Amino acid sequence: MFENLSDRLDRSFKLLKGEGKITEINVAETLKDIRKALLDADVNYKVAKTFTDSIKEKALGQNVLTAVKPSQLMVKIVHDELTALMGGETADINLKNNPSIILMSGLQGSGKTTFSGKLAKMLKDKKGKHPLLVADDIYRPAAIEQLKVLGEQIGVPVYSEPENKNPVQIAQNAIKQAKQSGNDVVIIDTAGRLAIDEQMMNEIAAIKAAVKPDEVLFVVDAMTGQDAVNTAKEFNDRLDFQGVVLTKLDGDTRGGAALSIRTVVNKPIKFVGTGEKMEAIDPFHPTRMADRILGMGDIVSLVEKAQEQYDEEEARRLQKKIAKNQFDFNDFLSQIHQIKKMGNLKDLASMIPGVGKAIKDLDIDDDAFKSIEAIIYSMTPAERTNPGILNGSRRARVAKGSGTAVSEVNKLLKQFEETRKMMKMMTTAKLPGKSAFAKKKR
């Protein structure tokens, strides 16, 4: 996501390196390169021109401090303008009513049904809601089945009437059902088409008029570039939706939709989808996205993802085991599973400032832990708890059972032992201070 744009912008800023001050000539050269980079990223031409004109106005009006280089100042101005371009503030979803009704709209293939499931899971797990998913696509039987499968996977009920061909009636009946069952959020997955047509627009407008949703979200495939922006405009003219959802941002997308859509429809991007997993949904933060585009990382989002998997009781238990040098392969396996739940490994690494550019050409497989897990699963319970008993014959058996070489098993055991020693040192290093404080207190 945005890799090409990030590289191009980085090259643009280098045009100002070595310059003593910002002038109309060197700014013009830099902005010309930035505009080209934006257009190559499929950003709307008018949006790109307005964006660079705004940067020029701000850059030429700035006095460069002695401590700040012109290129650094330009990065700051571009960052602020990118943030403003994408909406400035993070826009939250409206869940004030009970039940809150969310109407999903968009073309077929944009990822509406999958996103409906992701949103339901997020509201259930992170906001303590009790959502009801509504299969309101009367044209595509597979959509009803798909939603049922997703609902079962995430533990959320799905309302459907396969024989009913009246989408307005289905939506109204679903809301009645939600009130009876105590569901406080109703997510209505509507039908899409391969292209915008009058029948689809009339149908979804009728559903909106009948159920009066708190939120109408427009779901769009980010990989369609400017077509996504044009489609969003047509939907907004008819539906006046409250927010945009960009799916498939993890694909080979140039990012133009994310940078153009806010300006064209004047509606905020509320969520982004970054993968097939049901956890792959994130609120859209314009400032953090600007950070990532400019290669500054996104450490706040990384910490938030880590906190979602963080269990205080488990952390205390682990700390005690580490202090006693009892950290074993069962604990190690548990930590691997928590890391995997956080998302795509390359995406996670790119959130660390400075790492994104360094790993952009590396192929980081999501199955990077596969061989490690296979080795641990091939151990007996006793071996996992007490790795010291793994002698030569046991190691050969573990290697055979995991489909790896004995050298790989030896390497993992060596790394595990070194990690365990380091963790114990870090834990015990804190203990003298605590005991000294306790003695002083007594």
Image (cartoon, grey):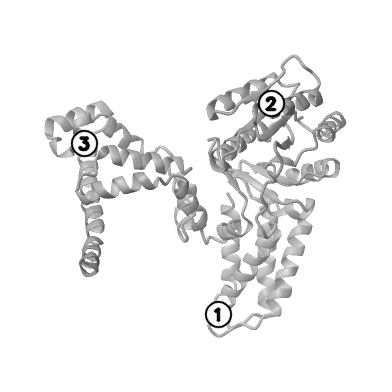
Residue bearing mark 2: 180
Q: SS at mark 3?
A: helix
Q: Residue furthest top?
A: 163
Give the residue at mark 3: 385
Nearest the viewer among 432 and 283 is 432
List the residue tagged with mark 1: 68
Looking at the rendered structure, the kind of residue marked 2 is Gln
Q: Does the image show residue 222?
A: no
> Spatial distance from mark 3 to mark 2, Cα to Cα?
50 Å
Q: Residues within 10 Å of mark 1 (few under 14, many from 20)?
A: few
Instruction: Report x, y in % for residue 297.
Output: 51, 58
Answer whether labels 3 and 2 touch (C-beta < 8 Å). Answer: no
Q: Amino acid at mark 1?
A: Val
Quarter of the figure with residue 35: bottom right
In the picture, the quarter occupied by the C terminus is bottom left
Which structural element holds mark 1?
loop
Q: Nearer the viewer, residue 430 or 20?
A: 430
Q: Is residue 411 left or right of residue 14?
A: left
